[in-house]
């Protein structure tokens, strides 16, 4: 990240950026070939008999797609629509293109390993709303319609999955890191060129309270003036003890020495949120996104906590899903629940 952002200086960093730029060229070639297969009709979009609402983004990393998908699915459910959430289920152990119900009206049906961490978390946050995983989104959508009578399908992380036609394309833009350093992967963090934002029907600006949104809005208006623009913030809701699953007062972190533990796309934003709760973040432990923790990692976390004299280890809900399946999760670990609120 330091090389990508230009923060890292020197000959080695410059050579690294040059190599990444070459790889970005190959990535762009693959992107253009894939787009052309749909443009000339070699591949066609599948349409299903339901309203498909995609919630995705244009950058790699944590823009807030999962809280956004939860927000919109909950809103449709409150309107008494038959809604399901359809996800790829990244990192799951079950067959990629086999549609599976993570949850139904009776509760959660799969383990985090079988479903993937994000679908499991979505299912836990949305009791009564079925969650389906399938790498083939069209197959997963048909499964959801047949099994659950879905009228609305919220497609989690669906902006790049054009094989399934959608009625709405909601693109989540993080105001603190909006455009992936302006370059395609791996030289930058863009999954697609910014011109792809022309496909969006709505932009949801997240963390709009933490950074000015004026520049972001100007760029979006230039690319796609017809799209609706919404603003939101990430609001801390509860602190939960990982082991006991009991709620702690939100002010319990005030003035306390804590470790911020995360394996998400945007760890800096999480760490700032912990600091805004009054905590003194004395150490940040960052693992790769979707990292499945091992007992040896817990030993390392405990050793660091002892070394720095931290009272608590504060982590995300998504991390909590992966930590809670271990025989012995970290001691004094608290989950910080965050929800999306419109501004």
Image: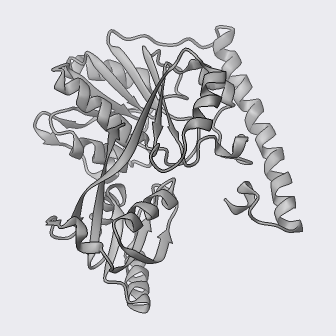
Tell me where residue 208 appears, x and y as whole percent: 47, 43
12 or 182: nearer the eye?
182
- Quadrant for the C terminus, please: top left
Q: What residue is drawn where x is 65% and y is 22%?
A: 223
- Quadrant for the N terminus, please: bottom right
Please state if 87 lies on the left or on the right of 190 as rendered: left
Tell me where residue 339 appears, x and y as whole percent: 30, 46
Please state if 77 lies on the left or on the right of 233 as rendered: left
Tell me where residue 83 appears, x and y as whole percent: 24, 24
Q: What residue is drawn where x is 44% and y is 85%?
A: 304
Q: What residue is drawn where x is 78% and y is 38%?
A: 26
Based on the displayed image, in which of its 4 quarters is residue 27 positioned? top right
The image shows residue 317, relative to residue 146, as above or below, that is below
Based on the displayed image, in which of its 4 quarters is residue 314 positioned? bottom left
Please state if 275 lies on the left or on the right of 122 as rendered: right
Q: How is the image coloured?
A: one colour
Based on the displayed image, in which of its 4 quarters is residue 123 positioned? top left
Q: What residue is drawn where x is 27% and y is 17%?
A: 145
Instruction: Report whether residue 95 is seen.
Output: no
């Amino acid at each position: 990240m330091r090389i990508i952002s230009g923060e890292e200086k020197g000959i080695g960093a410059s050579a690294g950026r040059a190599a990444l730029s070459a790889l970005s060229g190959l990535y762009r070639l693959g992107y253009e070939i894939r787009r052309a297969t749909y443009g000339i009709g070699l591949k066609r979009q599948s349409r299903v008999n339901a309203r498909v609402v995609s919630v995705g983004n244009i950058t790699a990393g944590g823009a807030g797609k999962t809280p956004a998908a939860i927000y919109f699915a909950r809103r449709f459910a409150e309107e008494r629509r038959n809604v399901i959430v359809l996800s790829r289920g990244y990192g799951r152990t079950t067959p990629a293109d086999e549609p599976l119900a993570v949850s139904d009206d009776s509760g959660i049906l799969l383990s985090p390993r079988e479903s993937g961490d994000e679908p499991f978390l979505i299912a836990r946050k949305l009791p009564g709303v079925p969650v389906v995983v399938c790498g083939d989104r069209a197959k997963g959508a048909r499964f959801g319609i047949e099994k659950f009578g879905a009228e609305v399908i919220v497609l989690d992380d669906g902006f790049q999955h054009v094989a399934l036609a959608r009625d709405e394309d909601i693109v989540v833009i993080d105001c603190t890191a909006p455009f992936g350093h302006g370059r395609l992967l791996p030289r930058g963090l863009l999954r697609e060129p910014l011109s792809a934002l022309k496909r969006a029907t709505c932009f949801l600006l997240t963390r709009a309270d933490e950074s000015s949104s004026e520049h972001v809005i100007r760029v979006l208006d230039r690319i796609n003036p017809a799209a609706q623009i919404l603003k939101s913030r990430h609001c801390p809701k509860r602190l939960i003890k990982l082991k006991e699953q009991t709620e702690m007062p939100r002010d319990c972190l005030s003035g306390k020495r804590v470790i911020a533990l995360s394996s998400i796309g945007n760890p800096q934003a999480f760490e700032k949120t912990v600091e805004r709760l009054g905590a003194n973040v004395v150490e940040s432990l960052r693992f790769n996104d979707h990292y499945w923790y091992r007992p040896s990692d817990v030993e390392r976390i405990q050793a660091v906590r002892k070394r720095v004299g931290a009272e608590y280890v504060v982590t995300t809900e998504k991390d909590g899903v992966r930590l809670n399946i271990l025989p012995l999760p970290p001691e004094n670990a608290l989950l910080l629940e965050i929800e999306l609120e419109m501004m």
